[in-house]
Every structure is written in structure tokens, then in C-alpha cells.
């Protein structure tokens, strides 16, 4: 037996948003700014003479993630160049 006066708690749009606010806008990074930052990091890596420079661990984490904001081929090329520099520094 179904009661028509009760709200269906499991209905798809019974409670679309708890506070009635619209969803937060999605952040999209500016590819030109990301590209400039990646080239700056790559230049810093190329200028280093040895691996234990201050930001190596940070750059190993963020560099690949940042390249995902660029076209796939460009990002892959930058990751390749960065990894080559990191290998050079390991060998030093």
C-alpha cells in the first residue's frame, strides 16, 4: 500500500542540491601560463649540476601533472625532456 502524501526519498531529483546553490564552476588552467611555468622548470633543471637541488622532489611530482593541461604531443615531449634531465642529474 502506497501513501501518496509522502515524498519519495529515493527519487532522482527529490533533493538535487542541499543548499539550493549552483555547482561551483570548473577551474581550467591557462595553457599559456602552464607552458611558461613548465619551460621555466625545465630551464632550471637543465641549469642544475647535481640532483639534490631544493625542488627536485616537488618538480618530479608536479611537472607530469602540469603537462596534462597541454595538447598530448606537447605534454609528452616536455615530460620526455624533463625525464632526460632528471636521469642526467642522477648520473652526475
Image (cartoon, rainbow, N blue to C red):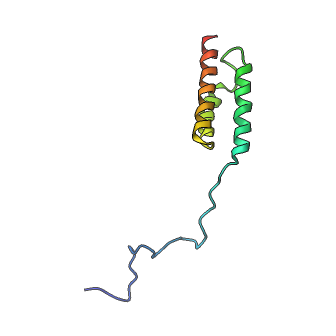
The quarter of the displayed image where residue 4 is located: bottom left
Does 46 sit above or below residue 25?
A: above
x and y percentages locating residue 52 in the rendered image = 67, 18
Residue sitting at the far left: 1
Write down the quadrant of residue 25 in the picture: bottom right
The residue that appears at 61% across and 42% down in the rendered structure is: 71
32 left or right of 77 in image:
right
Given residues 11 and 49, the one toward you in this image is 49
Q: Residue furthest front?
A: 73
Establish if 28 lies above or below 16.
above
State whether residue 81 is above or below residue 62: above
Q: To which quarter of the image does residue 88 belong?
A: top right
Foreground: 4 or 90?
90
- 90 in relation to 69, above or below: above
Q: Nearer the viewer, residue 1 or 40?
A: 40
Give the residue at x 74% y 25%.
Answer: 44
Amino acid at each position: 500500500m502506497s501513501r501518496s502524501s509522502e515524498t519519495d526519498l529515493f527519487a532522482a531529483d527529490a533533493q538535487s542540491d542541499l543548499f539550493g546553490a549552483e555547482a561551483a564552476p570548473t577551474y581550467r588552467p591557462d595553457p599559456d601560463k602552464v607552458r611558461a611555468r613548465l619551460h621555466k622548470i625545465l630551464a632550471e633543471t637543465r641549469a642544475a649540476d647535481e640532483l639534490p637541488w631544493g625542488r627536485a622532489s616537488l618538480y618530479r611530482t608536479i611537472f607530469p601533472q602540469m603537462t596534462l593541461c597541454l595538447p598530448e604531443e606537447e605534454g609528452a615531449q616536455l615530460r620526455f625532456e624533463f625525464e632526460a634531465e632528471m636521469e642526467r642529474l642522477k648520473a652526475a
